[in-house]
Amino acid sequence: MSHQHQGKKFENFIYDILQHRSKKLLVTALIFLSLFGTILMLPTEVVLARMLPGKSSNTFSIYVKTPDGSSISQTKEVVQCVEDILKPEKEVTDIESFIGEGAPLDYAGLVKGSGMKQGERFAEIVVNLTDKHHRDEKSFIMVQRLRPVIKNSCESKIEGTVLQMIEMPAGPPTMASIVVEVYGDSNTKVAGVANEVSKVLKQTDKIVDVDVMSETPYEKYKLMPISEKIARSGLSVEQVNQILYLAFKGMVVAVKNTIELNDQVGIFVSLSNETKDINENSLASLRTKLSSLYLMNTKGMMIPLTEVVDIKEVKSDRTIYHKDLKTMINVTAETDNQSQVYPLLDARDKMIEYFSQKGYDVNKEPGISTYMFDLTLVDKKTGEEYLLRWDGEMKVTLDTFRDLGAAFIAALILIFLLMVIYYKSYAISGIILGGSFLSIIGVILGHWVANLFTEDVFFLTATSLIGFIALIGISSRNSLLLVDFTKDLIKNNGIEKQRAIAIASATRLKPILLTAIAIILGSSLLASDPVFGGLGVALISGTVVAVIVSLIFVPVLMDNTKAI
């Protein structure tokens, strides 16, 4: 009896709304205001969109890049500074530092180019943490906390040093959250534009770890053996090369045979660090160091190395990078556990203003595509053209949202065609689809509520859109059953239209609620997952709104159409 009484009350509630035009207008206005308000949460940054949220892991890396021409001892100084900050952290179990090279490749290293970091100016620090299931602080929160401390303390050790905090990617295999590919004809001029781009990115809020993947030419010294003097001195070119390697790099001078090992063990000899270090970066210091090295000729005489070697000061060669047969330099940046969409749009606006003031004609990419944020720069003086192409996580996000959007539109069209074939009415089909689409209110609102109860940002992600697409079928089913039941009551029972709609709504109330509860309980297991949490929240909150729309707004639309 209580269920029948509640059903009768709901029937009268719906019937009362349908009888009064003002109440129907109020319901319609509230629904559309809710739709407009929730969609407005995205551009106003109340709800933030991102490809995938941060993922807590048991390790992260720090890439160290000292200025071009830096020695390995300078790189070690920066690495030591970073290690001193990390050691007191109670969650850090151990630290592995690889100086002059990248760490053995892992997933992050494969996509972020760790294997390309070879040379005295490069280092990688791998930080291992306690198990994430027994740790209160997530790894990406720890990185966000430590980043300003490490950068402020250690980048100033050697001016021009770049430190990058690298987390294990949660999903998309991209070089960085934000990547700007700078294309042009001249490698030197492209590098200049890339440096200007990096300046703009550094001045943009929420963008960190900005780096230009290009070398800056620096002064270096080239030691050239003088063949004529070497021959007159009774030496050989091989002798000169060997003593230079022995002094500054070290080399194998002999081997030792062992019983335990089948292979010969090389005996490596090199000068001590104190002996081979040069006091300052100057030609005079290098000459002084070389003058202390002597070679014995065939007559037993000691010949100073400076007598047979010519020292030239030259510029280093810049590496030329290409992509699709075009000269290109990457500028990378991270977003510090933020959505990359809003900082990117901010940086893009600043670039338009900056390059316009620098004497460039700045043109935006026409139309709507995944390249719609690209900019073309034309130098007003020389007519040279440069392309700024946005890549990285933003490009993957656009591609994914485009594909999911296409899947969503295809689903809507197919459902609409099926409904038209079944009902022979565009109006009824439109009502069913319109009611289904409104579940987007719950999807966005649910992420806003979830964000209030989580310590870090709860993003609207690609998995959230998958949940929204799944909701279309669920909410369409609710509306379809209401329409069928209402038409049956009118046709077979001769019940008046508004009363038939009210009875159908009251009759379907319990099954719709039970279905919704089942979906909510099933999806609650996903809501706490770091990657699929968006899918769970979308299904839970979207289902709640789908029920409200199906039972209150769809009856209003049904009453206003003549097709029923």
Image (cartoon, rainbow, N blue to C red):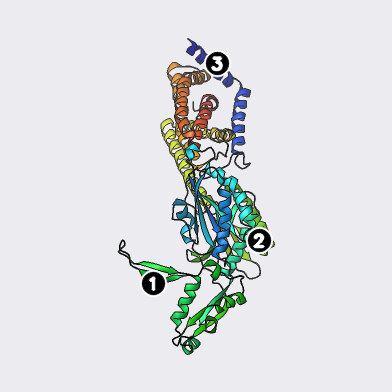
Secondary structure under the numbered disc 2 in the rendered image: helix
359 on left or right of 143 = right
* Amino acid type, residue under disc 3 in the picture: Asn
In x, y percent, where is residue 379? 63, 67
Label 2 to label 3: alpha-carbon separation: 65 Å
* Amino acid type, residue under disc 2 in the picture: Phe
Q: In which quarter of the image is residue 422?
A: top left
Q: In this view, does 201 lie above or below 14?
A: below
Which numbered disc flags the more N-terminal residue, 1 or 2?
A: 1
Can see residue 250?
A: yes
What residue would you read off at disc 3? Answer: 12
Camera-side residue of 46 and 157: 157
Label 1 to label 2: alpha-carbon separation: 60 Å
Camera-side residue of 207 and 78: 78
What residue would you read off at disc 1? Answer: 254
Q: What residue do we see at 62% from left, 59% from top?
A: 157
Category of crowding for the residue at label 2, using alpha-carbon neighbours closer than 10 angstroms: few (below 14), some (14–19), many (at least 20): some
Q: Nearer the viewer, mark 2 or mark 3?
A: 2
Secondary structure under the numbered disc 1 in the rendered image: strand
Q: What residue do we see at 48% from left, 66% from top?
A: 325
Q: Which of marks 1 and 3 is in front?
A: 1
Q: In this view, does 287 lie above or below 216?
A: below
Disc 2, disc 3: CB below 8 Å? no
What residue would you read off at disc 2? Answer: 355
